[in-house]
Amino acid sequence: MATRTVKPNTGARRNMSFADFSKLTRKKPEKSLLVSKKQKAGRNNTGKITIRHRGGGAKKHLRLVDFRLDTVEDAKIVAFEYDPNRSARLALLQLNDNTKAYILATTGMKIGQTISAGKEVEIRSGNRLKLRDIPLGSTICNVELQAGSGAQLARSAGAKAQLAAKEGEFVQVKLPSGEVRYIHQDCHATIGQIGNLDHQNIKIGSAGRRRHMGWRPAVRGKAMNPVDHPHGGGEGGSPIGLKNPKTPWGKPALGLKTRRRKYSNSMIVKGRKRGKR
């Protein structure tokens, strides 16, 4: 799905591009799969801002995407839709019991195509199988970390992983970050690559468009006063004046490891940086 440019009537629109929605076949979402979404503006349950620079923007509704979908036979694709909550596109399925479900659209999907999930399923883009039943070297996406928990890995636009090896109860999967990790062979994955590959080429172009997306302005630390930020103060365009960059709360901004789930380190075969765990 290519990007679309506009006439350069202003400086902002000169460097602005949009997603091409020509391949989407439906404008309004399926009402039975919609849930209202409350805007929190980066605040937690106590009302404190835990994520800065969030707020405003257009109102959105959540689409109930089925990330599990491990048993289905010949579900028909009836529409492709836009989802404001993710970079990937959605495919609307008509299931055999006349209910509908959303899944993430992969490259090559077409209207009228059937999607299946199970044990003896054809190795075809969009079909969903256990990792034990997928051939080595296959391109996969929508990968589960724990069997039955639903897909968690390789879900954004253009994302893909690769089944690298099989060892006993586990398989080795190379993730989009370059990390290679063990995943249990009973976990499910979808064959193929997530669609909307040109999402990375979109240029927002203006601050107003960014505000509509729910982002508020961000001020550079070196433009603040010393009381507001470790980088603040000085005359004119001063450097930060510190050995290493700092966050507004004085902690290292670059290079500090913040990964908390250390219990899964044993499952990492190769780290995403220089082969380190």
Image (spheres, rainbow, N blue to C red):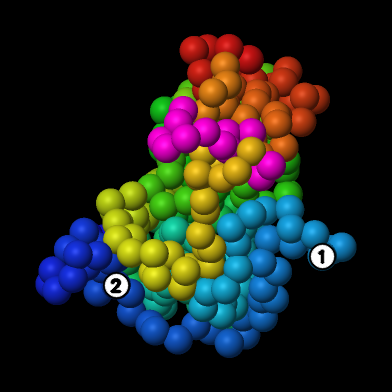
Of residues 172 and 255, the one nearer the viewer is 255
Q: CA distance from mark 2 to mark 1?
A: 37 Å
Please rate how many residues cluster around mark 1, counting C-alpha atoms within 10 Å: few if below 14, some from 14 to 19, many from 20. few
Q: Is residue 49 left or right of residue 24?
A: right
Dot 2 falls on a residue whose secondary structure is loop
The residue shown at (42%, 28%) is 137
Mark 2: which amino acid?
Phe
Residue 18 is at least partly visible in this image: yes
* SS category of the residue bearing label 1: loop
Q: Which residues are magenta?
A: 227-239
**Is residue 96 rendered to the left or right of residue 140?**
right
Position of residue 63 relative to residue 159, above or below, is below
User: Residue beneath label 1, please?
Assistant: 47
Q: Main secondary structure of the magenta part?
A: loop
Instruction: Indicate whether 188 appears above or below 73.
Output: above
Nearest to the observer: residue 68 or residue 177:
177
Q: Is residue 196 above or below residue 136?
A: below
Residue 100 visible to the viewer: no
14 lies left or right of 82: left
**Which residue is located at x 56 percent, y 45 percent?**
224
What is the number of the mark on residue 21?
2
Q: Quadrant of the N terminus?
A: bottom left
Q: Could you tell me residue 134's position as x and y percent?
A: 50, 36
- Would you identify the image quadrant in which residue 229 lies? top right
Look at label 1 and name its amino acid.
Gly
Q: Is residue 150 magenta?
A: no
Residue 54 point in image, percent of width and height? 60, 62
Residue drawn where x is 54% and y is 23% of the image: 241
Membership of 230 in magenta stretch: yes
